[in-house]
Amino acid sequence: MFRKLRTRIVVFYAALLGIVQLAAFILVNAANTTNAQQKINAELLTGERVFARLIDQKIERLTESARVLAADFALREAIATNDMRTVQSALTNHSARIKADRMMLVSLDGKVVADTSRAVGKGEVFPYPKLLDDARANGTSSSIEVMEQRAYQVVMVPVLAPTPIARVVLGFVVDDALARDLLQLTSLDVSFINHGAAGSLNMLATTLDSARSRQLLLELTQTTRGARIGEGDNEQQLRIVPLEQHGSPAVIAVLQRSVAAATAVFNRLKNTLLALSIGSFLISLLGSAFIARNITRPLDVLTDSAVRIQGGDYTTPVAVDRKDEIGALAGGLDEMREGIAVREQEIMRLAYEDTLTGLPNRSLFNKWLSDACRTGRTATILVMDIDRFKAVNDTLGHRVGDQVLRELAQRLRNFTVDDGTVARLGGDEFAILFESKTANEGMLKARALHALFDEPIAYQEQQLDVRTSIGIAAYPEHGADAGTLLRHADIAMYTAKQSKSGYAIYDSEYDTHRQEHLSMLSDLRRAVANDELQLCYQPKMTLATEVVGEVEALLRWQHPTRGFVAPAEFIPFAEQTGYIKVLTQWVLKEAIRQCGEWLRLGMPLRVSVNVSTRDLLDRDLTTVIADLLEKHQVAADLFCVEITESGVMDDPAAARKVLQQLHRLGVHLSIDDYGTGYSSLSYIAQLPVDELKIDRSFVANLASDSVCAAIVRSTIELGRNLGLKVVAEGVEDAAAVHALKELRCDSVQGYFVSKPLTAGKLEAWLQETARRRAHSAPSLDPPHSDAWVA
């Protein structure tokens, strides 16, 4: 559920509001608690002040009443005459008049003369001497004292005549009525307590009931200045007020306030706040749910529309009609849907249609062919390729080539209007699919199709002769799936192109030959890595001296399973695939290494290496050769690079630049197979070469063909006139050697001298030849028979 946006919105807003309201409630509640405590403390402090003021006012009234009594003439006279009866009567009457609970007359020496509460005890000492001392010092004194287990508010004033003759003491009982009066004035419960025997507390007066009074006495301590007692609704905040006194034990007043009553207002505020918080939380929860629903409902619609678009349904419009951002998003999505629908139609057209000819393309043809194979219907495909189409593009331009393709496409449409479908596979390659029962029907169709192009294509009053090669493959005879059929038809087409037969039906032998070529590249790579390649060296003999001072390095490949692979099989393939560069670098490394080895053995042989056209256009060729010569300590003059005449003419400017670099390096340069190409003599004369090698095709027919003899003679004359050394290759017999010597050819190379030999066998052959020459005169007879072993 939490993956849904609506749920996350509701939970987020609810959690956010809940946190805010909880924090606000905690803060407000803490403030209320603090305010409530401060209010209670303030009330108790105010009550204490009011209480103290009331006690002071009552003492003032009592003092005034005592002074009135003390000023009574009859009382003074009775005291002066020692009339105790009159004194007692005056005290009793005045006590009743002012509602005093007790009155006493005390002599100046501190003896009790009269007491309204009991019979006069002559000589009894006044029990509160500190009160008496205070009266002597200040004239009057007052305090709250405990007399006979009761607390009295006591006032002492002197009786003057005109000097003090005695002192009158008035006492008012501190009882529950006084406490209730104080409650009315302060709104606080009041209790008067004194310490009894053994540290116990005695309740003198209180506004509390008996249970609360006992609880107060149990929890109160003398040292307490302020505390809380009770729990819950019975919790009370106390304030202890010590009362002024001169006797013992001490009397205290306890003011107390109900905490529950004081905080009732704050509790109501807290409950109200809690109710508001809960209510606002619920309202906000409902509101957030409504907002989330209002947001996510159109999003759900947009999601459903996106899913439909993802599934390929571009027909259903996006059903969201709003004026806000979501509406804008919905409008954009709907426009995107329409745009995708239009573009998909165009993409489908481009995906299955060739833009140049309007024919179906390879993808659609593969689909047709796959459907035909899947349904099990017998079918035949013709794959057609235009012969020499590259020449049309190169000679007349691509615009003409495109027109040729369009004209071919139209002819193929007309050809398949009643039977079959046609497609352009790419480039100048087309394919036709039609139902057939046998492959022979494909042959008849291919023959008719080939004849269709006997008529040239007209372009701007120019007749273009276009010929085709057609490959034929039938289902299921030549393949069980579309890919196999196309590949086999393609193989048959290339076979027809190579044989120039016009059309050919697939044969498994064609495929084997192509597979061998496809595997040859990986075999070549393995051959380089596993040292399966080997160099053999064919000697070049100088005719004038019959001395061998040069050899040509020839590459040989002994395949582990195929056996010996002729250079004519893998060298052209390496040139086509670009792997010739790797082979050339291997040959250069091995040939220069062997040249250095022979040089250290006292055999300074010049080693020649053939390089291909691709190698000649390699900018790094000179650098590679220079590094190898330096590495193996070989003089540049002991190394010869042989290049073909056609290789030079493929890119004359680049070839000339590389040859000049090699010439400056000091490397010997030779043009191989001279006479087979189309290079001009003037261009050959400009090249920095050192020798010409006459191709074996002319040397082999030297004795029997006058034309070949003329070519050889003119070539030798040309080379001598240009200052070049001339080498004849392919020399097979002594007659050819004698003829070449008469024509003043410089050197010969061929089986008459020796077959290509491995490095070890060449060394043995050279030693044997040197030994024979040392014991006999020079001869042009064939060398020792060991030289014929390659």
Image (spheres, grey):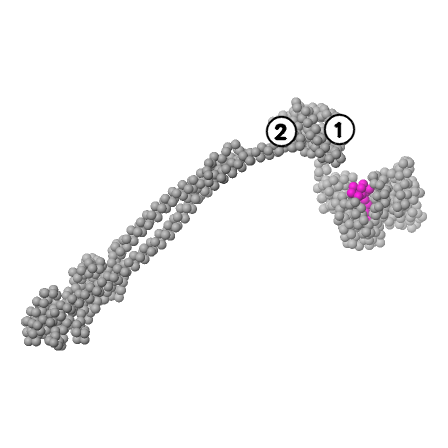
Residue indicated by mark 2: 368
Q: Nearer the viewer, residue 113 or 86?
A: 86
Q: Is residue 607 visible?
A: no
Q: Amino acid at mark 1?
A: Glu
Depth order, front residue of 124/790: 124
Instruction: Name the quarter where the C terminus is drawn.
Output: top right
Q: Quadrant of residue 72?
A: bottom left
Decide: is 351 above or below 771.
Answer: above
Q: Position of residue 29 (x, y in %)?
A: 33, 54
Q: Work out whether residue 259 or residue 332 is closer to the camera in this orientation and state it.
A: 332
Circle 1 packing at 10 Å, graded few (<14), some (14-19), many (20+), is: few
- Label pair 1/2, CB-CB below 8 angstroms: no
Above or below: residue 170 compared with residue 524: below
Image location of residue 10, percent across then percent down: 41, 44
Left or right relative to 652: residue 778: right
Q: Which residue is mark 1?
A: 461
Residue at image location 21% in from the left, 68% down from the top: 244
The image quadrant where one finds the N terminus is top left
Task: Please state which of residues 97 and 542 is positioned toward the viewer in this rendering.
Answer: 97
**How would you rate the neighbour count of disc 2 (Cα within 10 Å): few for under 14, some for 14-19, many for 20 or more?**
some
At a point 27% along the width and 60% down the height, the residue shown is: 42
Mark nearer the N terminus (1 vs 2):
2
Q: What is the span of residues highlighted in magenta in the rendered image?
A: 640-652
* SS at circle 2: helix
SS for tag 1?
loop
